[in-house]
Image: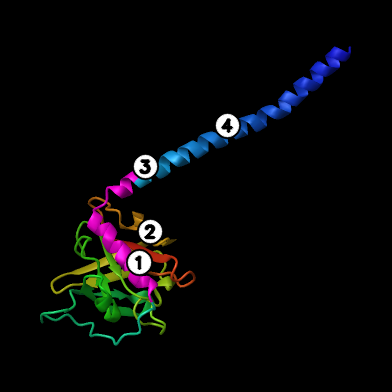
Amino acid sequence: MRKLSYFLVLVGFLILLVPSLMEWKADQEQNELLKEAEQARHNRMSKLDPSLSASYERVSQLLAEETAEAQPVSAQLTTAGGNSPIATIEIPAIDLKLPVLEGATKENMKHAATHMSETPPLGKSGNAAIAAHRAHKKGRLFNRLNEVVSGDKIIINTETERFTYVVYKISVVEPTDLSVLEDKGKEKILTLITCDPLKNPTHRLIVQAKLE
């Protein structure tokens, strides 16, 4: 009789233990899959153009510096030499219109939004990136970029063409997160980069849009 009691207790214990063991096994499998996914992502990121990686690192360092309060430049395109704008960027939802200079350099970022030269041309296939400071003054540079929401339009005007993008993704990432610059194949993506207003300068605010 006592043996039967012990047996029943053991059976009951095993019945209680089995769900926990199954949950533990599921957690282990989940962790393995997460590791596999992270490794795949790391491998993919390591294949990015080294010049693009270096450029993004440089942009992140510039954004981490004190936010620009430089003198504005004209948002009108010119054909003069030097640092003439290659385009203008407009975001009607936040009443923004800025010149876009070629090359995300310290000097260019004092005055305007800048196209990262290592990314595709604006309006073309791939993931074109534009970076700008968040000025302290409201409305200056990308100060109000955090007010943009999905569905808002971003308009790029070059000397000869007009491109309208629609925002589809907004994220906050670490400065080392290169995934925001991944090429989307034939898709025409525009990625805007600035400091996150809540975590400046430790994180980046990313706004991504697709060409209509």
Q: Quadrant of the C terminus?
A: bottom left
Q: Quadrant of residue 210?
A: bottom left
Task: Decide which of tag 1 and tag 2 comes sooner along the chain.
Answer: 1
Mark nearer the N terminus (2 vs 3) = 3
Q: CA distance from mark 1 to mark 3?
A: 24 Å
Q: Circle 2 sits in a helix, a strand or a loop, which is it?
A: loop
**Distance CA(mark 4)–CA(mark 3):** 23 Å
Question: Which amino acid, by three-letter code, is at mark 3?
Answer: Ala
Is tag 4's residue or tag 1's residue first in the polypeptide sequence?
Answer: 4
Expressed as whole percent of the image width and height from the top left, the position of residue 43 reads 33, 44
| Picture quarter with the N terminus | top right
Residue at image position (84%, 13%) is 4
Residue 212, visible in the rendered structure: no
Cα distance, mark 1 to mark 2?
Answer: 8 Å
Q: Position of residue 168 (x, y in %)?
A: 37, 60
Left or right position of 23 against 63: right
Look at mark 1 in the image and give the residue it sits on: 60
Front disc: 1 or 3: 1
First-in-chain label (1 vs 3): 3
Q: In x, y percent, where is residue 169?
A: 39, 60
Count residues near mark 4 (Cα–Cα under 10 Å), then give few for <14, some for 14-19, many for 20+: few
Specify start and end residues of the magenta stretch as a single range. 43-65
Image quadrant assignment for residue 143: bottom left
For residue 25, the mark is 4
Count neighbours of disc 2 (C-alpha within 10 A) and say few if under 14, some if 14 to 19, many if 20 or more: few
Alpha carbon separation for disc pair 4 and 1: 41 Å
